[in-house]
Amino acid sequence: MTPERIVYMDHSATTATDPAVVDAMIPWMTARYGNPSSVYRLAGESRKAVEEARASVATVLGADPGEIFFTSGGTEADNWAIKGVAFAHQKKGTHIITSAIEHHAVLHTCRYLEQHGFSVTILPVDETGKVRMEDLKAAITDQTILVSIMTANNEIGTIQPVTAIGALCREMGILFHTDAVQAIGTIPMDVRSMNIDLLSLSGHKFYGPKGAGALYIRKGVRVENLLHGGGQEKRKRAGTENVPGIIGLGAAIGLAAERMEEQALRVSTLRDRLLAGILERIPHTRLNGHPSDRLPGNINVSFEFIEGESILLLLDRVGICASTGSACTSGSLEPSHVLRAIGIPAERAHGSLRLTLGAENTGEDVGYVLEHLPGIISRLREMSPLYADFNKRSMDV
Amino acid sequence: MYSEKVMDHFMNPRNQGEIPDADGIGEVGNPSCGDIMRIFLTIRDNIITDVKFQTFGCGAAVASSSMATELIKGKTLEEAWDVSNRAVAEALEGLPPIKMHCSVLAEEGFTRRSTITG
């Protein structure tokens, strides 16, 4: 069975590479294949193009090009920032602070460091997913060397008070890293005014290629290398540059910044319509996360009495791509750590659905989801013993 | 991820529903694990003449429930008790390793213990 159309609402997972970005990349896989480290002119072209991409990333972040280091993506940037700071500053202190709703690239890196002599405080968040400044203040000790708090969450879209966190860290002489993988291209970022020392980003989240990301390291911040080998990236990140990926990343971040304001407004308007429609048409449904401080395209709702993977399978049948915090898709049989951290009971986390809208979504897409989703939810509820029990209880009352 | 057979049973579940005056009801799982299966039986002369299920869970849980009802319908209680989770998974042409517990759920939904509740 071929669905009549594809409605892609999983932009927090990945995005389609913009055709203009693909066009910008292709020459660097064909005619201009030179290794930037080589001497001849063919290589010089690659070297120059990589530096132009670096300048493009720096401009969008409000950084200097010399502060941008290319990586294989967000996970490498997070690993490098956290391990790199920890190992470079362990004589000064061995305490790291992060939050309970970070991406696993941050949380599992912190867990790894715990096995290597570091101590980690994982801050709780409030019911909207925000870190409380008083919790952060209370967690800081004279051993604290790094605070790592994401700019915006990938599951519930909650935006953190990054500027306030940055200001506090700067005042206390503690380095501040933020995983901005979900934020770049959707909300404005400025590393100077936000007092950010390290920032991770990933190209494929803003219509760039997969396998290309960057870490911003503020000038003067000491970070140990993660990868050892050749002298690329000012001897900080070994390995031949992913030239086509870097060119694509540079092109994509430029386009994303140019379109950000208009896109954020357009996408959030569609998102608000979709959310209102879902809450109006489907009873026993709740929004997870913050009512307003959330990424423009993010919806995360829980449907009571049913399980998320089943919802995804039925949505897929009609061509709608989405995701869930249910255990049944995590591979670990644990429901989303983010939903659990904002106090959502496991059974409601299992019934969660994340729809993340982006550039190619239209009003018709919103209508299409609203046409199919209510029927899918009813169908699964008809099958659910929890719903049967709920109806019996309602009849008894 | 799933075999065609699993998707068929998920999309077109057999024997889904409730038997209001069932002779036996079995239930396993709990909402915090993300899986609950409830099975209703009508038993005449030691033979399962009718069976229905309700399931809260993923695609594999629904398909396992559906297949389990197919496998035990028309069997004697003793024969039905011998239906293993492996038999359910095999009849579904396999389940992903992480989903094998869903077929265990289907097996446990129908045990000696479960059939005395009704």
Image (spheres, rainbow, N blue to C red):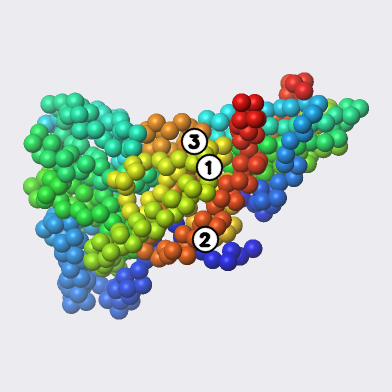
Q: Chain of mark 2?
A: A
Q: Identify the residue at horizontal 43%, vertical 33% (top origin).
A: A344
Quarter of image, res A340: top left
Considering only order in the chain, which callout, 1 or 2, is on the residue closer to the N terminus? 1
What secondary structure is found at the residue carrying circle 1?
loop
Residue A368 is tagged as: 2
Q: Do the residues marked 3 and 2 share a common chain?
A: yes
Mark 3 vs mark 2: give the one in front.
2
Q: CA distance from mark 2 to mark 1?
A: 19 Å
Q: In the image, what residue occupies the spot 89% across and 29% down?
A: B44
Between marks 2 and 1 in the image, the one whose residue lies nearer the viewer: 1
Q: Which residue is mark 1?
A: A283
Which residue type does callout 2 highlight? Answer: Tyr
Q: Are marks 2 and 1 in contact (CB under 8 Å)?
A: no
Using residue B71 as the reference point, say whether residue A384 is left or right of it.
left
Name the residue carrying label 3: A348
Outermost residue on the front side: it is A397
Mark 3 → mark 2, Cα distance in angstroms: 25 Å
- Could you say which quadrant of the image residue A26 lies in? bottom left
Question: Can you give x and y, in whole percent of width and height, for residue B17 in the image?
Answer: 72, 39
Q: CA distance from mark 3 to mark 1?
A: 14 Å
